[in-house]
Image (spheres, helix red, strand yellow):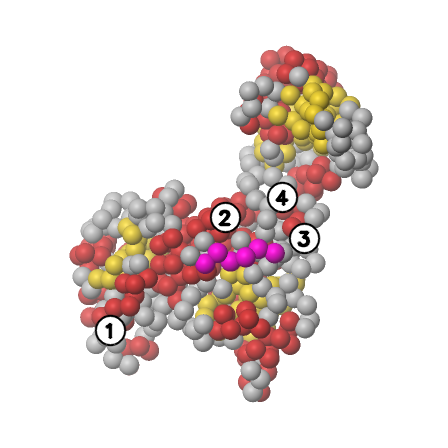
Amino acid sequence: MKSVIMDSTAIERALKRIAHEIIEKHTSVPVSLIGIRTAGVFIASRLAEYIGQFGQIPVQTAILDITLYRDDAAKGAGRAIVRATEIHFPVDNAFIILVDDVLFTGRTVRAAMDAVIDLGRPKVIQLAVLVDRGHRELPIKADYTGKNIPTTDDDQIKVVLTESGSKEDAVYLMRKGD
Amino acid sequence: MVSGKGIIGLKYLGKDDIEQIVETAFSMRDISKRSVKKVPTLRGKTVINLFFESSTRTKTSFEIAAKRLSADVVNFSYASSSTSKGETTIDTAKNIEAMNPDVFIIRHASSGIMELLSRHLKTPIISAGDGTNEHPTQGLLDIMTIRDEKKRIDGLKVVVAGDIYHSRVARSDIYGMGKLGAKVYFFSPPTMITEDYASLGARVTYDAQEAFTDADVIIMLRIQLERQATGLFPSTREYAKVFGLNEQRLKLAKPDVIVMHPGPINRGLELSSGVADNKEHSRVLKQVENGVSIRMSAIYHTIGEGHEYTDN
């Protein structure tokens, strides 16, 4: 079973709200949005655009590939493709917001934090996600959430965005069985 | 893919394998440029540097590569090994394998020994050079260096010049670059090559004009000075004049030609100082830098489970 949880209007509204929240809550500038590959990168650049529109505060974006920091990397090494991390600003003392599409176990975010901290000592790291589906395995919580979606363990959440070639933005919930 | 199997020669890798290793190496290169030059990927994995033939730079390059991925590296070299006490290579390797390493980096003077060892060992092997057969990571870093500069390999004229017969680099280069579509020329004195090399897909020439004209890439090989004693060439001066690369000869090549060399260089013999130090064309030090990235990628792709070689 596949159902639409968010359509393109809902996604746009959620991201605009997050942008407003960031403008309200940020404690220093520039706001550095680091998108986690792949979908997080697209969401980060949309957020940057909205923040620029609404808040006129300086914002910069970067791309993070966490493959080498995964806690299952040593098991699966040799299969996962490592793509470039492109962070062209100093991380030291920066106000960083990690951006991802779905927050699930929290392991991706843990890996992303390690990766960022290896580059320097940020002032703050916050987390923005489009969807929080629960089932955390680590003590991690998002600072900005587009939508909370209650799920069971073996449900799947699929985020499709126009940047990755689909016609329309949407968030789907895929449920096993019926 | 190479995972779980190792990289014993570019002969055994498919085009896709080569491209994936090179692609990953570009991502790995960023790690070496940071202040914290380490990622936790291979934490708890053990890499054995098993060198039956002396080598400083290749061993160092592999060691740095493994450490940047957080693997533990143990160096085992000929001088301290029990091969000097009469143990066979297979026995030595099996003994170390009993200590449960995750990958072997092996260099050995005997051509073809990697195939033999890989039949006897369960642990994947990355070859760091076997005799005059192959030096796959050098071939891969050469490909990476060319890709970096030219953005492609396909259709480029690549000249490999020097003692082809004794060069494991030349063989890995032709296997790798051939699969990626380069036009490879072997330029060498007739005493340092055989007709058979044409069957690897290279064009063999003894004529400098033909070799260097319109070259996109020139790879000069090291001439081992002791070979002169065996009569392979009459004198070093004559070699430099007829087969060496100097500024004048470089003008035959394309204006944006790059010059590479696996090192160590014999200045004034195969490569004039003017060319070796020419910032515009020489990529010798870039090769060394890329070598670490390629070896990180090779180790990363090798440690893992379950894929087969593609033999083509």
Indicate the position of residue B107 as horizontal and vertical percent values: 50, 70
Near-viewer residue (A94 or A81): A81
Q: Which residue is mark 2?
A: B20
Front: mark 4 or 3: 3
The subunit letter for the residue under badge 4 reads: A
Circle nearer the N terminus (2, 1): 2
Q: Amino acid at mark 2?
A: Gln
Q: Which residue is mark 1?
A: B191
Q: Amino acid at mark 3?
A: Lys
Q: Residues within 10 Å of mark 3 (few under 14, many from 20)?
A: some
Q: Are marks 2 and 1 in contact (CB under 8 Å)?
A: no
Q: Is residue A34 left or right of residue B193?
A: right
Q: Is residue B92 left or right of residue B25?
A: right
Task: Tell me what residue is drawn at x 57 percent, y 44 percent.
Answer: A82
Location of residue A33 by image quarter: top right
The subunit letter for the residue under badge 2 reads: B
Location of residue A100 by image quarter: top right
The label shown at residue A66 is: none
Q: Residues at marks 2 and 4, common chain?
A: no
Q: Are marks 1 and 3 in contact (CB under 8 Å)?
A: no
Q: Which residue is mark 4?
A: A67
Q: Residues at marks 3 and 2, common chain?
A: no
Q: Which residue is mark 3?
A: A75
